[in-house]
Image (spheres, helix red, strand yellow):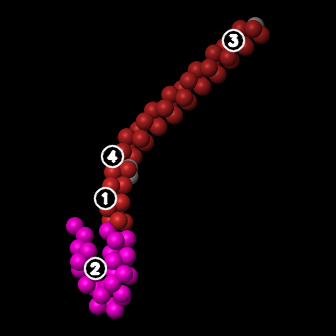
Amino acid sequence: MLDTHAIARTLTAAELSPAQVDAITDAIRQAAEHEATDSETFATKADLSTLETSLLKWTLGIVLSVAGIQTAILIAALRFLV
């Protein structure tokens, strides 16, 4: 939990004006709230692992499909030539 009162005391001790203290404290509070709500949008290691597995499966599927198509074309071409 963010202690805005402690921040305000520190800024007041540094001889900032009350308006400056309020503005800085509000900005820090808003940034902390924004960070707390946005933390759910970041990918976790588990998310990345799942994505990596999925991409690997898709890549392998595409490579095997292309190899199959190339083999079919090669067989068709050989039959045509013979």
Structural distance between the alpha carbons of marks 1 and 2: 19 Å
The amino acid type found where label 3 is placed reads: Ala
The residue at the point 49 percent across, 32 percent down is: 58
Q: Residues within 10 Å of mark 2 (few under 14, many from 20)?
A: some
* Label 3 SS: helix
Q: Up-down: is 1 above or below 18?
A: above
Q: Residues within 10 Å of mark 4 (few under 14, many from 20)?
A: few
Q: Secondary structure at mark 4?
A: helix
Compute the Cα span from label 3 to label 4.
45 Å
**What secondary structure is the stretch in magenta mostly built from?**
helix
> Bounds of the magenta span?
1-29
* Quarter the N terminus occupies: bottom left
Q: Please name whichever residue, 71 or 36, is drawn nearer the observer in this view of the structure.
A: 36
8 magenta-colored: yes
Q: Quadrant of the C terminus?
A: top right
**Residue that mark 3 sits on:** 76
Specify the label residue 46 is tagged with: 4
Dot placed on the residue nearer the N-terminal end, 2 or 3: 2
- Disc 1 versus disc 4: distance between alpha carbons? 20 Å
- Nearest-to-viewer mark from 1 and 4: 1
Residue holding disc 1: 36
Mark toward the viewer: 3 or 4: 4
Amino acid found under the numbered disc labelled 4: Ala
For the residue marked with disc 1, what is the amino acid?
A: Ala
Residues at marks 1 and 4 touching, judged by CB atoms closer than 8 Å: no
Residue topped by disc 2: 7
Q: Amino acid at mark 2?
A: Ile
12 sits left or right of 81 in the view? left
**In what element is the residue under mark 2?**
helix
| Nearer to the camera, 22 or 43 | 22
